[in-house]
Amino acid sequence: MDILTIVLIAIGLNFDSLAVSITTGLVVKQIKFMQAFRVALVFAIFQALMPLLGWFLGTEIREFIVSYNHWIAFSLLFLIGAHMIWESFKNEEDKNYSNPLKISVTVGMAIATSIDALAVGVSFAFIDINILFATIIIGSLTFVVSMFGMLLGKKAGGFFGKKIEIVGGLILIGIGAKILLGHL
């Protein structure tokens, strides 16, 4: 897999983190740099480790499903993307905001925003990819995006939230379609 595709996947995975980071910036308007750094670091660690974990799981079952792995990769990315788009239409009142600086809340948000990365990691097991390189790209981009999101939330408010999640979902669906078409 080429670097551009890995970066596009990382971007697609990061829209949830960006939306949550923007919300963090909205909720904690006076967030300090080190607080934002800690939140972004936790998000980056989870977002980087989940694809690695998924890749390990996927390599264990690869032999059993190698003849239709492109369909699995497409299905996982399509479902993740569609779920992101669906979630973008939830009302803000339906979302429960806690103190995002509390470590248990930060870890909970990190897990919630990185579950899709686990599924992407499973799909990585079926394609030619340097998983450590992909992990570094995904984690690094998550850190930068999360820091930017908190700053944006602090400065600009919640204007972008739903649109960002829709774009992220569409990117993941597009990557899944690219993988499927490449094998047909």
Image: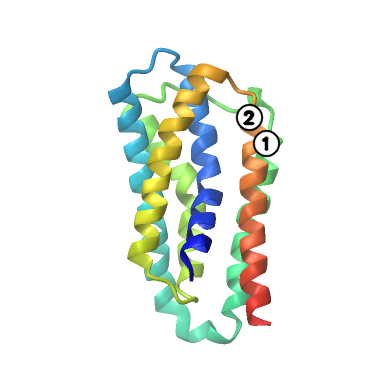
In which quadrant of the rendered view does residue 8 lie?
Answer: bottom right
Looking at the rendered structure, the kind of residue marked 2 is: Phe
Q: Nearer the viewer, residue 18 or 105?
A: 18
Q: Residue furthest left?
A: 34
Query: Callout 1: helix, strand or loop?
Result: helix
Looking at the rendered structure, the kind of residue marked 1 is: Lys
Image: 74 above or below 151: below
Disc 2: which residue:
160
Cβ atoms under marks 1 and 2 closer than 8 Å: yes
Q: Residue furthest top?
A: 30
Q: Position of residue 95 (x, y in %)?
A: 59, 28
Q: Nearer the viewer, residue 65 or 121?
A: 121
At label 2, counting other C-alpha atoms closer than 10 Å, the crowd grade (few under 14, some 14-19, many 20 or more) is: some
Q: Write the residue at 64% across / 68% down.
A: 178
Q: Write the residue at 46% across / 80% down.
A: 62
Disc 1: which residue:
163
Q: Write the residue at 66% across / 58% down.
A: 173
Q: Position of residue 30 (x, y in %)?
A: 40, 12
Q: Write the residue at 51% across / 23% down.
A: 153
